[in-house]
Image: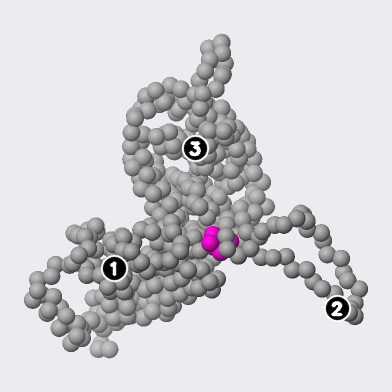
């Protein structure tokens, strides 16, 4: 290096993509060593127990080195690659083939723009990019655009990540026979595991004693002596089981329940706004009044937050995911509606960004979609100190103004970490929620 010239490197690190994640799988690299990258460019597809995301570059530069190849499982915090950055980063010199390709494209004035993964998918399936309409910014062709075309071809190769293809191969499952539940008909890990359970019924193995053997040691009798089938737990389900068991073991949960009257609020709620949005909006208001619950308890240290990062429990076929609405206290009622609609849609399609599953300070779990559920208790999402469980909002007979009336009510149950929050604080939260509910004017 010449005097004063220094090359600076930035590490691409596998982040924690959500609740209890300890490791993840690198699926496929979207950039290769030597490729220029810009802040916000998608670098690599990574799969966690709950979702698949594209990690983006956090700086401008050149992808210098890939340290973890595709279809590899590594721990959270592992360095996946390095980006060479800074004004003094060595310039990328295009090869003669690249120059020829660029010149040819310029000569034909081809305006096509496509992501590297979209180009690769199109090439694998023999598709011409010129025949695909781009839905990205400026007409850029995305992976989803190519997958939509592939999904419409008869006999097309099933769409699946490399790790999912390997899982199917290991268990003798033909991906062509599976209906993908992922975005664009993509076959997910949950689809393969469901097919495995459906087709792999394990027969009971009855050990035969040898002619000469030691005295047998009695083993515990099965809970049920008849025919039964083992259901293989998905990675997401195992993670949820481990983390929630830890939550119940480490946190002394304390519960308070209140039945609140939504009759007047629903009369003035705009038609374009759903009840769930109203519940989120009122929860934010209550947390602003009772900030002790807008907190986390981590390694013996208690943290309060100036803004509300609201987690929303979303049910998926394979388990549960909690996208986070950051800065929820900065949104209006309609703003919360628009933002949460987008978050929930992408959560169900497995397209959340890593930061959209991190940093929650309080969580809401709403089972009101099931009309028979009047109330329930929820388990706290660590390291948070509280979670609000909401039952069905429906008509009930209640005492109102000294007489029996039919009113629209719901039961709210707050679970709080009793190490941090006392019972009166929990009760004040329900009280604050009701105060804002009765004052709601739409």
Circle 2 sits on which residue? 210
Query: Which quadrant of the view contains residue 275?
Result: top left
- Quarter of the image with the C terminus in it: top left
Q: Nearer the viewer, mark 1 or mark 2?
A: 2
- Quarter of the image with the N terminus in it: bottom left
- Label 3 with label 2: CB-CB less than 8 Å: no
**Mark 2, residues whose alpha carbon is within 10 Å: few (<14), some, or many (≥20)?**
few
Helix, strand or loop under label 2 = loop
Earlier along the polypeptide chain: callout 1 or callout 2? 1
Earlier along the polypeptide chain: callout 3 or callout 2? 2
Q: Which segment is the magenta one?
A: 193-197
Q: Nearer the viewer, mark 3 or mark 2?
A: 2
Q: CA distance from mark 3 to mark 2?
A: 58 Å
Q: Is residue 312 left or right of residue 417?
A: left
Q: Is residue 282 magenta?
A: no
**Mark 1, residues whose alpha carbon is within 10 Å: few (<14), some, or many (≥20)?**
many
Q: Is residue 430 above or below residue 315?
A: above
Helix, strand or loop under label 1 = helix
Provide residue 40's location: percent of width, then percent of height.
30, 64
Q: CA distance from mark 1 to mark 2?
A: 60 Å
Helix, strand or loop under label 3 = loop
Circle 1 sits on which residue? 118
**Residue at coordinates 23% horizontally, 81% vertically from top-left?**
92
Provide residue 90's location: percent of width, then percent of height.
25, 82
**Residue at coordinates 49% horizontally, 60% vertically from top-left?**
191
Q: Find residue 369 and name its label.
A: 3
């Amino acid at each position: 290096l010449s005097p004063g010239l220094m090359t600076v490197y930035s590490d691409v690190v596998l982040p924690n993509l959500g609740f209890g994640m300890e490791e993840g799988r690198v699926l496929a690299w979207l950039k290769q060593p030597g490729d220029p990258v810009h802040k916000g460019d998608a670098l690599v597809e990574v799969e966690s127990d709950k979702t698949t995301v594209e990690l983006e570059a956090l700086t401008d530069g050149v992808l210098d080195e890939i340290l973890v190849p595709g279809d590899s499982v590594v721990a959270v915090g592992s360095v996946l690659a390095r980006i060479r950055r800074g004004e003094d980063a060595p310039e990328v010199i295009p090869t003669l083939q690249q120059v020829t390709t660029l010149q040819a494209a310029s000569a034909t004035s081809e305006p096509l723009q496509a992501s590297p993964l979209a180009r690769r998918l199109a090439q694998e399936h023999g598709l011409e990019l010129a025949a695909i309409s781009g839905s990205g910014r400026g007409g850029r062709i995305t992976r989803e655009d190519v997958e939509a075309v592939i999904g419409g071809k008869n006999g097309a190769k099933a769409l699946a990540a490399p790790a999912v293809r390997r899982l199917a191969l290991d268990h003798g499952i033909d991906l062509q026979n599976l209906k993908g539940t992922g975005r664009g008909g993509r076959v997910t890990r949950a689809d393969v595991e469901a097919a495995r359970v459906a087709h792999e019924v394990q027969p009971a193995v009855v050990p035969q004693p040898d002619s000469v053997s030691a005295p047998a040691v009695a083993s515990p009798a099965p809970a049920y002596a008849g025919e039964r089938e083992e259901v293989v737990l998905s990675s997401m389900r195992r993670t949820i089981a481990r983390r929630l068991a830890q939550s119940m073991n480490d946190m002394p949960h304390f519960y308070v329940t209140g039945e609140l009257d939504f009759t007047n609020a629903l009369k003035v709620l705009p038609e374009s706004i759903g009840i769930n949005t109203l519940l989120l909006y009122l929860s934010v208001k209550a947390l602003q009044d009772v900030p002790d619950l807008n907190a986390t308890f981590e390694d013996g240290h208690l943290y309060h937050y100036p803004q509300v990062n609201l987690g929303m429990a979303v049910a998926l076929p394979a388990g549960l995911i909690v996208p986070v609405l950051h800065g929820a206290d900065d949104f209006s009622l309609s703003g919360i509606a628009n933002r949460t609609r987008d978050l929930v849609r992408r959560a169900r399609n497995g397209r959340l960004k890593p930061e959209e599953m991190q940093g929650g300070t309080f969580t809401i779990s709403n089972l009101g979609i099931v009309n028979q559920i009047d109330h329930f208790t929820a388990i706290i999402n660590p390291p948070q100190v509280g979670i609000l469980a909401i039952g069905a909002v429906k008509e009930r007979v209640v005492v109102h103004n000294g007489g029996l009336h039919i009113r629209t009510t719901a039961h709210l149950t707050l679970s709080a970490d009793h190490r941090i929050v006392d019972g009166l604080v929990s009760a004040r939260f329900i009280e604050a929620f009701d105060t804002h509910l009765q004052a709601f004017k739409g």
